Protein backbone atom coordinates (compact mmCIF):
# COMPACT_ATOMS: atom_id res chain seq x y z
CA UNK A 1 0.00 0.00 0.00
CA UNK A 2 1.26 3.42 -0.87
CA UNK A 3 1.92 5.64 2.11
CA UNK A 4 -0.03 8.87 2.19
CA UNK A 5 1.79 12.01 3.17
CA UNK A 6 1.04 12.80 6.79
CA UNK A 7 -0.14 9.25 7.59
CA UNK A 8 1.65 7.15 10.22
CA UNK A 9 4.68 5.47 8.70
CA UNK A 10 4.69 7.73 5.67
CA UNK A 11 8.08 8.80 4.37
CA UNK A 12 8.62 12.58 4.36
CA UNK A 13 8.55 14.10 0.90
CA UNK A 14 12.01 14.89 -0.39
CA UNK A 15 12.68 18.62 -0.50
CA UNK A 16 13.97 19.99 -3.78
CA UNK A 17 17.65 20.66 -3.77
CA UNK A 18 18.63 24.30 -3.51
CA UNK A 19 19.96 25.58 -6.82
CA UNK A 20 23.66 26.08 -6.96
CA UNK A 21 25.01 29.59 -7.20
CA UNK A 22 26.16 29.13 -10.79
CA UNK A 23 22.78 27.78 -11.85
CA UNK A 24 21.02 30.63 -10.08
CA UNK A 25 23.19 33.20 -11.84
CA UNK A 26 22.55 31.56 -15.20
CA UNK A 27 18.82 31.48 -14.44
CA UNK A 28 18.69 35.25 -13.94
CA UNK A 29 21.09 35.90 -16.83
CA UNK A 30 18.74 34.22 -19.29
CA UNK A 31 15.90 36.44 -18.13
CA UNK A 32 17.69 39.77 -17.98
CA UNK A 33 16.85 41.83 -21.09
CA UNK A 34 19.64 44.37 -20.52
CA UNK A 35 22.27 41.66 -20.43
CA UNK A 36 20.90 39.87 -23.49
CA UNK A 37 20.53 43.05 -25.56
CA UNK A 38 23.90 44.51 -24.58
CA UNK A 39 25.77 41.24 -25.05
CA UNK A 40 24.02 40.53 -28.35
CA UNK A 41 24.95 43.89 -29.85
CA UNK A 42 28.54 43.70 -28.63
CA UNK A 43 28.96 40.19 -30.03
CA UNK A 44 27.40 41.25 -33.33
CA UNK A 45 29.91 44.08 -33.74
CA UNK A 46 32.74 41.81 -32.64
CA UNK A 47 31.73 39.24 -35.25
CA UNK A 48 31.52 41.99 -37.86
CA UNK A 49 35.03 43.16 -37.00
CA UNK A 50 36.43 39.63 -37.10
CA UNK A 51 34.90 38.26 -40.28
CA UNK A 52 33.83 41.41 -42.12
CA UNK A 53 37.33 42.20 -43.46
CA UNK A 54 37.59 38.66 -44.83
CA UNK A 55 34.83 39.43 -47.33
CA UNK A 56 36.36 42.70 -48.55
CA UNK A 57 38.65 42.20 -51.53
CA UNK A 58 40.41 45.56 -51.25
CA UNK A 59 42.07 47.65 -48.57
CA UNK A 60 40.11 50.26 -46.61
CA UNK A 61 42.09 53.17 -48.04
CA UNK A 62 42.25 52.05 -51.67
CA UNK A 63 40.53 54.13 -54.36
CA UNK A 64 38.11 51.63 -55.80
CA UNK A 65 35.06 53.51 -57.05
CA UNK A 66 33.53 56.78 -58.17
CA UNK A 67 33.85 59.70 -55.80
CA UNK A 68 31.17 60.82 -53.31
CA UNK A 69 28.69 58.10 -54.21
CA UNK A 70 25.75 57.42 -51.83
CA UNK A 71 25.06 53.88 -50.60
CA UNK A 72 24.23 51.42 -53.36
CA UNK A 73 24.24 47.72 -54.14
CA UNK A 74 27.90 47.91 -55.13
CA UNK A 75 29.08 50.13 -52.29
CA UNK A 76 26.89 49.42 -49.27
CA UNK A 77 27.87 52.57 -47.38
CA UNK A 78 28.86 54.68 -50.35
CA UNK A 79 32.26 56.17 -51.11
CA UNK A 80 34.34 59.06 -49.84
CA UNK A 81 35.36 62.16 -51.74
CA UNK A 82 38.35 60.16 -53.01
CA UNK A 83 36.47 57.02 -54.07
CA UNK A 84 37.28 54.91 -51.01
CA UNK A 85 34.81 52.24 -49.94
CA UNK A 86 33.24 53.37 -46.65
CA UNK A 87 31.96 49.85 -45.88
CA UNK A 88 35.52 48.52 -46.07
CA UNK A 89 36.69 51.32 -43.79
CA UNK A 90 33.86 50.60 -41.36
CA UNK A 91 34.51 46.87 -40.91
CA UNK A 92 38.24 47.43 -40.53
CA UNK A 93 37.51 50.34 -38.18
CA UNK A 94 35.32 48.15 -35.98
CA UNK A 95 38.15 45.63 -35.70
CA UNK A 96 40.57 48.40 -34.70
CA UNK A 97 38.07 49.75 -32.17
CA UNK A 98 37.85 46.39 -30.42
CA UNK A 99 41.62 45.92 -30.49
CA UNK A 100 42.21 49.27 -28.83
CA UNK A 101 39.41 48.66 -26.33
CA UNK A 102 40.68 45.23 -25.33
CA UNK A 103 44.35 46.21 -25.21
CA UNK A 104 43.96 49.64 -23.62
CA UNK A 105 41.32 48.44 -21.18
CA UNK A 106 43.37 45.32 -20.47
CA UNK A 107 46.51 47.30 -19.60
CA UNK A 108 44.51 49.59 -17.31
CA UNK A 109 42.79 46.57 -15.74
CA UNK A 110 46.03 44.71 -15.02
CA UNK A 111 47.75 47.75 -13.49
CA UNK A 112 44.68 48.92 -11.58
CA UNK A 113 43.81 45.53 -10.10
CA UNK A 114 47.43 44.78 -9.17
CA UNK A 115 47.84 48.11 -7.39
CA UNK A 116 44.42 47.83 -5.75
CA UNK A 117 44.90 44.27 -4.51
CA UNK A 118 48.37 44.90 -3.09
CA UNK A 119 47.35 48.17 -1.42
CA UNK A 120 44.18 46.71 0.04
CA UNK A 121 45.76 43.51 1.28
CA UNK A 122 49.05 44.84 2.60
CA UNK A 123 47.78 48.07 4.17
CA UNK A 124 50.14 50.22 6.21
CA UNK A 125 53.01 52.00 4.50
CA UNK A 126 52.55 49.98 1.28
CA UNK A 127 48.94 51.16 1.05
CA UNK A 128 49.95 54.77 1.68
CA UNK A 129 52.64 54.74 -1.02
CA UNK A 130 50.43 53.07 -3.65
CA UNK A 131 47.49 55.29 -2.73
CA UNK A 132 49.67 58.38 -3.15
CA UNK A 133 50.85 57.13 -6.55
CA UNK A 134 47.26 56.49 -7.58
CA UNK A 135 46.18 59.96 -6.51
CA UNK A 136 49.06 61.57 -8.44
CA UNK A 137 48.12 59.80 -11.66
CA UNK A 138 44.43 60.44 -10.98
CA UNK A 139 44.81 64.23 -10.84
CA UNK A 140 46.92 64.38 -13.99
CA UNK A 141 45.01 65.66 -17.03
CA UNK A 142 45.01 62.32 -18.82
CA UNK A 143 43.89 63.61 -22.20
CA UNK A 144 46.55 66.34 -22.22
CA UNK A 145 49.22 63.81 -21.29
CA UNK A 146 48.05 61.49 -24.05
CA UNK A 147 48.02 64.28 -26.63
CA UNK A 148 51.54 65.42 -25.75
CA UNK A 149 52.96 61.89 -25.59
CA UNK A 150 51.38 60.57 -28.77
CA UNK A 151 51.99 63.77 -30.74
CA UNK A 152 55.76 63.30 -30.42
CA UNK A 153 55.71 59.75 -31.78
CA UNK A 154 56.71 59.42 -35.41
CA UNK A 155 54.77 56.18 -35.91
CA UNK A 156 51.55 55.65 -34.00
CA UNK A 157 50.08 52.17 -34.02
CA UNK A 158 47.05 50.61 -32.41
CA UNK A 159 49.02 48.99 -29.61
CA UNK A 160 51.05 52.12 -28.87
CA UNK A 161 47.86 54.11 -28.57
CA UNK A 162 46.27 51.41 -26.41
CA UNK A 163 49.35 51.27 -24.18
CA UNK A 164 49.27 55.00 -23.47
CA UNK A 165 45.53 54.85 -22.81
CA UNK A 166 46.01 52.00 -20.36
CA UNK A 167 48.85 53.76 -18.54
CA UNK A 168 46.61 56.77 -17.83
CA UNK A 169 43.27 55.02 -17.18
CA UNK A 170 44.01 52.66 -14.28
CA UNK A 171 43.73 54.86 -11.13
CA UNK A 172 39.96 54.72 -10.62
CA UNK A 173 40.01 50.93 -11.02
CA UNK A 174 42.83 50.72 -8.46
CA UNK A 175 40.84 52.76 -5.95
CA UNK A 176 37.71 50.67 -6.46
CA UNK A 177 39.57 47.34 -6.15
CA UNK A 178 41.47 48.60 -3.11
CA UNK A 179 38.24 49.38 -1.25
CA UNK A 180 36.92 45.88 -1.93
CA UNK A 181 40.23 44.22 -1.04
CA UNK A 182 40.39 46.14 2.26
CA UNK A 183 37.06 44.62 3.25
CA UNK A 184 37.94 41.07 2.19
CA UNK A 185 41.43 41.12 3.72
CA UNK A 186 39.94 41.00 7.23
CA UNK A 187 37.77 37.93 6.63
CA UNK A 188 38.42 34.77 8.63
CA UNK A 189 39.32 32.61 5.63
CA UNK A 190 41.98 35.13 4.58
CA UNK A 191 43.43 35.18 8.10
CA UNK A 192 43.49 31.39 8.05
CA UNK A 193 45.32 31.37 4.70
CA UNK A 194 47.79 33.91 6.07
CA UNK A 195 48.45 31.80 9.16
CA UNK A 196 48.99 28.72 7.02
CA UNK A 197 52.02 30.41 5.48
CA UNK A 198 50.72 31.13 2.01
CA UNK A 199 52.41 33.87 0.04
CA UNK A 200 50.74 37.18 -0.68
CA UNK A 201 50.22 36.50 -4.38
CA UNK A 202 48.67 33.11 -3.67
CA UNK A 203 46.26 34.55 -1.11
CA UNK A 204 45.19 37.34 -3.45
CA UNK A 205 44.63 35.06 -6.44
CA UNK A 206 42.95 32.17 -4.60
CA UNK A 207 41.11 33.78 -1.68
CA UNK A 208 40.39 37.45 -2.44
CA UNK A 209 40.08 37.77 -6.23
CA UNK A 210 37.59 34.89 -6.72
CA UNK A 211 35.23 36.47 -4.19
CA UNK A 212 35.04 39.68 -6.21
CA UNK A 213 35.19 38.15 -9.70
CA UNK A 214 31.86 39.69 -10.73
CA UNK A 215 33.13 43.12 -9.67
CA UNK A 216 36.31 42.61 -11.68
CA UNK A 217 34.37 41.63 -14.81
CA UNK A 218 32.27 44.77 -14.62
CA UNK A 219 35.37 46.90 -14.02
CA UNK A 220 37.00 45.53 -17.16
CA UNK A 221 33.88 46.26 -19.23
CA UNK A 222 33.92 49.88 -18.04
CA UNK A 223 37.63 50.19 -18.81
CA UNK A 224 37.00 48.63 -22.22
CA UNK A 225 34.34 51.21 -23.07
CA UNK A 226 36.43 54.06 -21.67
CA UNK A 227 39.41 53.07 -23.82
CA UNK A 228 37.19 53.12 -26.93
CA UNK A 229 35.97 56.64 -26.13
CA UNK A 230 39.46 57.97 -25.38
CA UNK A 231 40.81 56.42 -28.58
CA UNK A 232 37.97 57.95 -30.58
CA UNK A 233 38.79 61.36 -29.12
CA UNK A 234 42.47 61.02 -30.04
CA UNK A 235 41.56 59.82 -33.52
CA UNK A 236 39.18 62.72 -34.04
CA UNK A 237 41.93 65.27 -33.44
CA UNK A 238 44.29 63.45 -35.79
CA UNK A 239 46.35 61.48 -33.26
CA UNK A 240 45.09 58.03 -34.19
CA UNK A 241 47.02 55.16 -35.81
CA UNK A 242 49.16 56.46 -38.64
CA UNK A 243 49.14 53.17 -40.55
CA UNK A 244 45.54 52.01 -40.34
CA UNK A 245 41.90 52.98 -40.11
CA UNK A 246 39.54 53.35 -37.17
CA UNK A 247 36.04 54.66 -36.56
CA UNK A 248 37.49 57.80 -35.00
CA UNK A 249 39.77 58.40 -37.98
CA UNK A 250 36.77 58.00 -40.29
CA UNK A 251 35.03 60.81 -38.39
CA UNK A 252 38.17 62.92 -38.53
CA UNK A 253 38.46 62.48 -42.31
CA UNK A 254 34.77 63.23 -42.82
CA UNK A 255 35.04 66.49 -40.88
CA UNK A 256 38.34 67.46 -42.52
CA UNK A 257 36.87 67.04 -46.02
CA UNK A 258 33.56 68.78 -45.26
CA UNK A 259 31.30 65.75 -45.52
CA UNK A 260 28.66 67.47 -43.38
CA UNK A 261 28.63 70.60 -45.55
CA UNK A 262 28.29 68.57 -48.73
CA UNK A 263 25.51 66.40 -47.28
CA UNK A 264 27.54 63.19 -47.39
CA UNK A 265 25.83 61.69 -44.35
CA UNK A 266 26.95 58.17 -45.27
CA UNK A 267 30.54 59.17 -44.48
CA UNK A 268 30.15 60.39 -40.89
CA UNK A 269 26.95 58.70 -39.65
CA UNK A 270 28.18 55.03 -39.72
CA UNK A 271 31.37 55.56 -37.66
CA UNK A 272 29.67 57.93 -35.22
CA UNK A 273 26.75 55.57 -34.80
CA UNK A 274 29.09 52.59 -34.49
CA UNK A 275 31.05 54.16 -31.61
CA UNK A 276 27.85 55.23 -29.86
CA UNK A 277 26.17 51.83 -30.18
CA UNK A 278 29.24 49.85 -29.05
CA UNK A 279 29.87 51.99 -25.97
CA UNK A 280 26.17 52.17 -25.08
CA UNK A 281 25.85 48.40 -25.42
CA UNK A 282 28.80 47.91 -23.09
CA UNK A 283 27.10 50.17 -20.55
CA UNK A 284 23.80 48.29 -20.88
CA UNK A 285 25.68 45.00 -20.54
CA UNK A 286 27.34 46.27 -17.38
CA UNK A 287 24.00 47.33 -15.88
CA UNK A 288 22.58 43.90 -16.68
CA UNK A 289 25.51 42.16 -14.99
CA UNK A 290 25.08 44.38 -11.94
CA UNK A 291 21.43 43.35 -11.69
CA UNK A 292 22.38 39.67 -11.94
CA UNK A 293 25.22 39.70 -9.42
CA UNK A 294 23.44 41.98 -6.95
CA UNK A 295 20.41 40.15 -5.47
CA UNK A 296 18.83 43.45 -4.41
CA UNK A 297 18.60 44.57 -8.05
CA UNK A 298 17.27 41.33 -9.54
CA UNK A 299 13.96 41.34 -11.31
CA UNK A 300 12.03 38.11 -10.81
Image (spheres, rainbow, N blue to C red):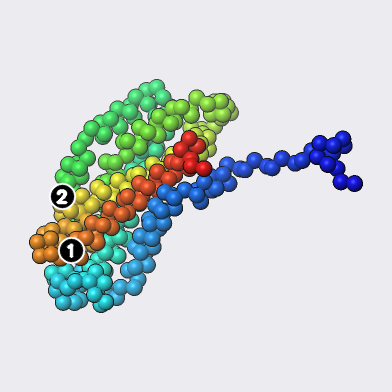
Q: Which residue is drawn at 79% across and 38% down?
A: 12
Name above or below for residue 211 compared with residue 264: above
Label count reads 2
Discs 2, 1 touching: Cβ within 8 Å? no
Q: Residue at x 38, y 57 (%)?
A: 41
- Corner quadrant of residue 182: top left
> Is residue 234 in view?
yes
Tell me where residue 107 appears, x and y as whole percent: 34, 45
Read off the residue under disc 2.
151
**Could you say whether the residue bearing mark 1 is in a helix, strand or loop?**
helix
Tell me where residue 11 appears, x and y as whole percent: 82, 39
Q: In this view, does 100 lie to the left or right of 30?
A: left
Q: Which residue is drawn at 33% across and 28% down?
A: 131
Read off the residue under disc 1.
265
* Of residues 55 and 43, the one drawn nearer to the viewer in this rendering: 43
Name above or below for residue 108 compared with residue 266: above
* Of residues 123 and 49, the one drawn nearer to the viewer in this rendering: 49
Q: Is residue 121 left or right of residue 136?
A: right
Q: Residue furthest top?
A: 124
- Disc nearest the viewer among 2 and 1: 1
Name above or below for residue 159 compared with residue 13: below
Q: Which residue lies furthest to the right in this view?
A: 1
Tell me where residue 144 appears, x and y as whole percent: 17, 41
Estimate the spatial distance between the alpha carbons at disc 2 and disc 1, rounded to whole Å: 30 Å
Label 2 or label 1, whichever comes before in sequence order:
2
User: Which disc is residue 104 wearing?
Assistant: none
Amino acid sequence: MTNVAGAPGAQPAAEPAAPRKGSETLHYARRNPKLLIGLGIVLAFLLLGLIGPLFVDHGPNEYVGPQSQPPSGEFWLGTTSFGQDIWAQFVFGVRTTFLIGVFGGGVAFVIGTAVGFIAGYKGGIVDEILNMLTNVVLVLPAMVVLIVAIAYLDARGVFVQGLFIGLTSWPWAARAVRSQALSLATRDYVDLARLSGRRTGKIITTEIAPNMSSYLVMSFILLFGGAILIAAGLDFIGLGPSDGVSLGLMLESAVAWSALQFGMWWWFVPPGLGITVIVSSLYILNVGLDEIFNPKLREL
